Image (tube, rainbow, N blue to C red):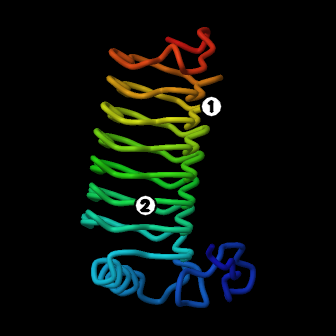
Amino acid sequence: MYEIQPCAVEGCEQTAVLGENTCYAHLSDRQAYVDALITRLQGDGALYDADVSGVEFRNVDFSGIGLYGCRFSGATFDRCTMSRGSVDLCVFDHARFSDCSMVEANMRNSVFGGAILTNCDYTGSNIVQCSWNAAVCTTVIFDDTDLLHSRFIGAELVDTSFRNCNLKAVQFQHSIRIRGSFKYSNDEEAIFDAEAIR
């Protein structure tokens, strides 16, 4: 797993990003850092045990890349493609995803708690034992996805589709679900509290 190191700037409570002694906000050239990180990712095909919290990724193709044991707390992913990639033991708490494509991805044992997702597509993915607790999903597609043992407790799901999904033991307690679709899914295996449906 990643090693947590505090930002070297006095009074800053954030953590230093991979390869630097400050957090992303205090880097002298944030774009150069992102460019170098993307080049590394695309060259190596994987990233292990890295803390890149708060980093902003825009128009990046992560297709086929593996992320293992990494921390992306508060990171931004805008118009990114992560299709057919692998994610395992990663943390994306309070991250923001907008207009992203993650189709046919493999995600396991990862945390998206408090994340905000808008216009994202996870069609045909395997998302097993992942936590989406308190996430806010607007126009997100999880169709044809295996969500075995994942959790959406306290999540806000607006215009979000779970069509033809494996929802075995998926937890939706205390979630708000507005205009969502669970058509053809095995939702009898999921755990709901009906009063949260709108």
- CA gap between label 2 and label 1 equals 23 Å
Residue 158, visible in the rendered structure: yes
- Residue 153: x %, y % from top left: 62, 31
Residue marked by disc 1: 153
Residue 181, visible in the rendered structure: no
Number of residues whose C-alpha sits closer than 10 Å to that of mark 1, classed few (under 14), some (14–19) or many (20 or more):
many
Residue marked by disc 2: 76
- Depth check, mark 2 against mark 1: the one in front is 1
Query: Residue at (63%, 30%) from the top-left corner?
Result: 154
- Residue 44: x %, y % from top left: 33, 82
Mark 1 residue element: loop
Amino acid bearing label 2? Thr
Can you tell which quarter of the image residue 139 is in?
top left
Amino acid bearing label 1? Ile
Q: Earlier in the sequence, mark 2 or mark 1?
A: 2
Q: Which quadrant would the N terminus be assigned to in this image?
A: bottom right
